[in-house]
């Protein structure tokens, strides 16, 4: 008995047409789309067909239009799962939205389960069981009328007039031209596939949006940390985060905030730089004075002049002169 099957199981590769044929033949319905069974009533009757008498069909509402009415049907289905100890999770919030992919996957699982059970399927009377349901009689009448109309359209015409070839060809051409001019109302499988692809792309875009929103939320929480919330860089990041426009002015303002902070830091350090330049200039001047002993400033004699004066004095006091 298949209660939990993997996503790569062959059951999830069953096509829509096969699923619809199985539902309509088992329950004598006339569904044209899988998502028409999103109310949960069809699922309940499929379980009743697999396990006759286990589903309280008087609680099932085939005329459910609103979500709260559909949820009641899924509650009945969940109770049946609990009785049968089936651990399959029912994603009610997705199924009631009528999304084709979610309803298709769940119906594929239902088909796999019912095929594995296959109990009482041949002796099951779906119309009789549906009479006790709310809206079940109307659904039974509609299905019977649709089946009768399909049989009448498929039956060959015994009494057919034999028109001439000349009248037959123009009428066929006129019908073909009118069909070409008139757009198809049903859409066909190509339109259904296109709609499914678009809905899948929407789901992927929503996941990508949620991913980047979570990243931005983490950055916002980090910027609110008391140790760094007063830094200019953090203020610039918050400026970009909380900007509601899309003209790029927030980025320019954030860059201006960071540039002004750098200018203020440079201006605060400039007096120290001037003092250091003055000190270095004075030290260079002292070094020049030490290296060049002939330097004379403000009438101060150099050491060479003093030595020459002393030598003259000694020469004058010498006894040899």
Image: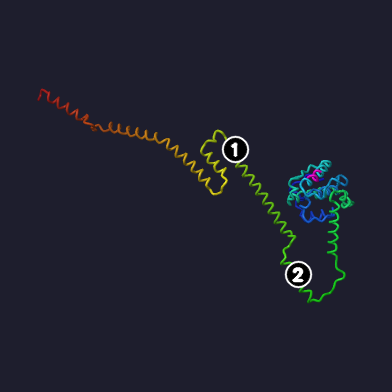
Distance from the alpha carbon under mark 1 to that under mark 2: 67 Å
The rendered magenta stretch, by its main secondary structure, is classed as helix
Q: Nearer the viewer, residue 257 or 269?
A: 257
Mark 1 surroundings within 10 Å by alpha-carbon count, few (fewer than 14), some (14 through 19), many (20 or more): few
x 85%, y 73%: residue: 161
Dot label at residue 221: 1
x 54%, y 49%: residue: 247
Q: Position of residue 51 (x, y in %)?
A: 86, 46
Q: Which SS class for mark 1?
A: helix
Which residue, given by chain and number where applicable, does mark 2 sit on? 175
x 71%, y 67%: residue: 181
Q: Earlier in the sequence, mark 1 or mark 2?
A: 2
Q: Residue furthest left?
A: 321
Mark 2 surroundings within 10 Å by alpha-carbon count, few (fewer than 14), some (14 through 19), many (20 or more): few
x 32%, y 32%: residue: 282
Q: Nearer the viewer, residue 19 or 212?
A: 212
Q: Which SS class for mark 2?
A: helix
Residue 190, magenta (yes or no): no
| Region in magenta | 71-75
């Amino acid at each position: 008995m298949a209660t939990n099957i993997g996503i790569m199981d062959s059951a999830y590769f069953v096509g829509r047409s096969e699923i619809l044929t199985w539902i309509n033949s088992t329950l004598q319905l006339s569904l044209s789309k899988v998502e028409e069974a999103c109310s949960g009533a069809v699922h309940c009757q499929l379980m009743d067909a697999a396990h006759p008498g286990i589903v309280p069909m008087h609680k099932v509402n085939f005329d459910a239009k609103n979500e709260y009415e559909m949820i009641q049907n899924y509650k009945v289905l969940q109770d049946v799962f609990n009785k049968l100890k089936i651990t399959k999770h029912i994603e009610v919030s997705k199924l009631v939205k009528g999304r084709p992919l979610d309803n298709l996957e769940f119906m594929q699982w239902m088909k796999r389960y019912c095929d594995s059970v296959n109990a009482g399927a041949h002796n099951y009377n779906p119309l009789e069981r549906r009479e006790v349901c709310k809206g079940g009689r109307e659904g039974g009448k509609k299905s019977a009328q649709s089946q009768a109309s399909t049989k009448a359209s498929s039956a060959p015409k015994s009494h057919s007039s034999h028109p001439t070839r000349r009248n037959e060809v123009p009428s066929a051409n006129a019908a073909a031209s009118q069909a070409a001019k008139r757009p198809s109302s049903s859409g066909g499988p190509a339109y259904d596939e296109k709609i499914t692809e678009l809905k899948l792309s929407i789901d992927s875009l929503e996941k990508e949006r949620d991913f980047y929103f979570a990243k931005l939320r983490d950055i916002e929480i980090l910027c609110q940390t008391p140790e760094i919330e007063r830094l200019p860089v953090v203020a610039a990041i918050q400026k970009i985060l909380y900007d509601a426009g899309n003209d790029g002015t927030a980025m320019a303002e954030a860059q201006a905030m960071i540039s002004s902070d750098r200018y203020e830091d440079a201006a605060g350090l400039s007096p120290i730089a001037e003092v250091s330049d003055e000190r270095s200039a004075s030290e260079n001047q002292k070094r020049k004075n030490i290296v060049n002993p002939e330097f004379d400033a403000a009438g101060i004699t150099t050491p060479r002049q003093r030595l020459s004066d002393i030598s003259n004095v000694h020469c004058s006091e010498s006894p040899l002169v």
